[in-house]
Image (cartoon, rainbow, N blue to C red):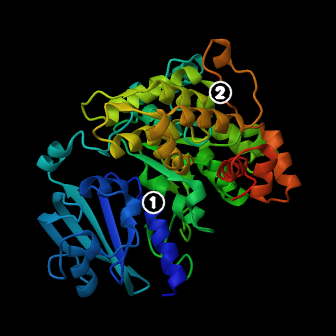
């Protein structure tokens, strides 16, 4: 099999199995990890990015005789073990029930795939551990602002119906969290919840992911179930639905209207019973005007439209969220925020929204497990945009008690985009730098002929932030 074809197959498996409720680990013919989902990471104690492309023997204290993946790969036969005990290289002892099979495409073994279920005592022993997976509910949506409470109220009402829902919000605002909460409060909560990111599907494979394939449909085709069939009886969450091609959107629209799908190569349709929740990080009107989304599909998936506000538009929630993350990731210890740290949180415009805030607090807690209070320097060192600045300023901060560091943070903030009035400032919240308008970003990008560095300089923002806004607005892939 051509390497490029095998790579597409593995990418497809990763996308489909990412949110499977069991652990999945697959390797290619050389034993390199090509598929590794979230649940497997929770079992092993790894993050997927720590595992992908690594050889199985780098990850576990196993050899060619004790590795079930390696045995299935080399023998070409399935391996089933009622109880496998192994130790990951991170030191975690793991006990699972496994089933491992070679992956065969067009008569050729291209790798091996293993599904794993932790023993019940393992699940109990790891409950509450960092990264343990659970279904989110409406109680997990934090915030006291009117904007977020309105969104939650509408989502709760939508959960009591079976209507399709469109969730609109920037990256990191919690679209999947809201989708999970709707599913968990709906009549379909006993069925599966399957989440897919349409922008991450390999080029040309969106239709096969959605609807599945049947053997003989095209050269090398095999019987593969699509996500609509997998999610039957439950909820299918399609994130970045506007990233699909117009042709695939037309077929999705027909599937939603008719309640049936046509797998590629099938001779008859397959009936489906799925509630679709869709999400976009582009305003619907803009997506339609730019040709990213068919208007008829918008009206079909947007029977209920829930707009999630960006964090910069609800500044009163920033410290509420930060304290909740301190409690969640502090593991029982009480950790506070210095006054400089609180000012930094309120001044930053959070282009990555709640996800960015959560990751910053979590990283700071993990980097300084002995800290009873997080300082400005700790938060900045834990932030990808400010880490180098924090390290540079560390010596000066130590000499003068951090005053220069605080002033430096203020100067850096003031170099951002032009200020504008916000509801938070009217309520007396600390002044915050705001991002340039979308029109200004587009104009700067066009004037710079797509050069991110020049556009960023024109707007007075960092290149990283310009890159984020260019992708958010669909100016760059």
Earlier residue among tags 2 and 1: 1
Label 1 CA crowd tier, 10 Å (few <14, some 14–19, many 20+): many
Up-down relation of residue 219 to residue 254 (above or below)? below
Up-down relation of residue 65 to residue 48 (above or below)? below
Residue drawn at x 65%, y 56% is 244
Spot occupied by residue 266 in the image (x, y as percentages of width and height): 53, 68
Res. 173 mark: none
Spot occupied by residue 255 in the image (x, y as percentages of width and height): 59, 51
Spot occupied by residue 223 in the image (x, y as percentages of width and height): 44, 71
Residue located farthest toward the front when viewing the structure as drawn:
399
Instruction: Classify mark 2: helix, strand or loop.
Output: loop
Q: Which residue is mark 2?
A: 432
Res. 16 mark: 1
Q: CA distance from mark 2 to mark 1?
A: 41 Å
Observer able to see residue 40: yes
Observer able to see residue 168: no
* Residue 116 shown left or right of residue 229 in the figure: left
Residue located farthest toward the top when viewing the structure as drawn:
427
* Residue 270 shown left or right of residue 477 in the figure: left
Q: Nearer the viewer, mark 2 or mark 1?
A: 2
Label 2 CA crowd tier, 10 Å (few <14, some 14–19, many 20+): many
Spot occupied by residue 439 in the image (x, y as percentages of width and height): 83, 40
Q: Hey, which quadrant is residue 475 in on the image?
A: bottom right
């Amino acid at each position: 099999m051509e390497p490029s074809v095998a790579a597409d197959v593995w990418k497809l498996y990763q996308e489909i199995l990412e949110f499977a409720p069991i652990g999945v680990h697959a390797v290619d013919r050389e034993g390199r990890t090509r598929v590794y989902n979230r649940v497997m990471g929770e079992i092993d104690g790894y993050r997927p990015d720590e595992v992908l492309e690594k050889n199985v023997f780098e990850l576990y204290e196993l050899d060619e005789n004790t590795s079930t993946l390696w045995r299935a790969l080399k023998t070409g036969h399935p391996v089933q073990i009622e109880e496998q005990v192994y130790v990951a290289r991170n030191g975690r002892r793991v006990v699972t029930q496994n089933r491992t099979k070679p992956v065969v495409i067009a008569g050729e073994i291209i790798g091996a795939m293993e599904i794993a279920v932790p023993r019940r005592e393992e699940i109990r022993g790891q409950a509450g551990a960092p990264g343990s997976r659970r279904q989110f509910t409406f109680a997990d949506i934090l915030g006291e602002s009117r904007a977020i409470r309105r969104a939650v109220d509408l989502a709760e009402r939508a959960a009591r119906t079976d209507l399709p829902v469109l969730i609109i919000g920037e990256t990191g605002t919690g679209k999947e969290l809201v989708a999970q909460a709707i599913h968990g409060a709906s009549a379909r909560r006993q069925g599966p919840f399957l989440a897919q990111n349409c922008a991450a599907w390999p080029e040309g494979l969106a239709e096969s992911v959605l609807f599945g394939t049947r053997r003989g449909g095209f050269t090398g085709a095999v019987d593969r179930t699509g996500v609509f069939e997998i999610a039957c009886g439950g909820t299918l969450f399609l994130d970045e639905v506007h990233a699909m091609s117009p042709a695939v959107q037309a077929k999705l629209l027909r599937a939603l209207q008719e309640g049936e799908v046509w797998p590629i190569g099938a001779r008859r349709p397959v009936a489906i019973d799925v509630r679709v929740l869709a999400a976009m990080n582009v305003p619907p009107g803009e997506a339609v005007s730019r040709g990213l989304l068919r208007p008829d599909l918008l009206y079909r998936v947007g029977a209920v439209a829930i707009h999630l506000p960006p964090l910069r538009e609800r500044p009163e929630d920033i410290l509420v969220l930060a304290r909740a993350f301190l409690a969640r990731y502090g593991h029982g210890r009480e950790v506070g925020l210095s006054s400089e740290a609180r000012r930094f949180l309120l001044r930053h415009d959070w282009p990555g929204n709640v996800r960015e805030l959560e990751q910053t607090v979590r990283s700071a807690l993990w980097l300084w497990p002995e800290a009873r209070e997080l300082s400005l320097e700790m938060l900045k060192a834990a932030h990808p945009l400010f880490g180098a600045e924090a390290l540079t300023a560390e010596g000066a901060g130590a000499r003068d008690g951090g005053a220069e560091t605080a002033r430096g943070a203020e100067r850096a903030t003031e170099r951002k985009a032009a200020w504008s009035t916000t509801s938070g400032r009217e309520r007396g919240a600390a002044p915050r730098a705001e991002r340039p308008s979308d029109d200004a970003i587009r104009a700067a990008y066009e004037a710079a002929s797509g050069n991110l560095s020049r556009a960023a300089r024109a707007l007075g923002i960092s290149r990283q932030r310009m890159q984020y806004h260019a992708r958010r607005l669909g100016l760059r892939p």
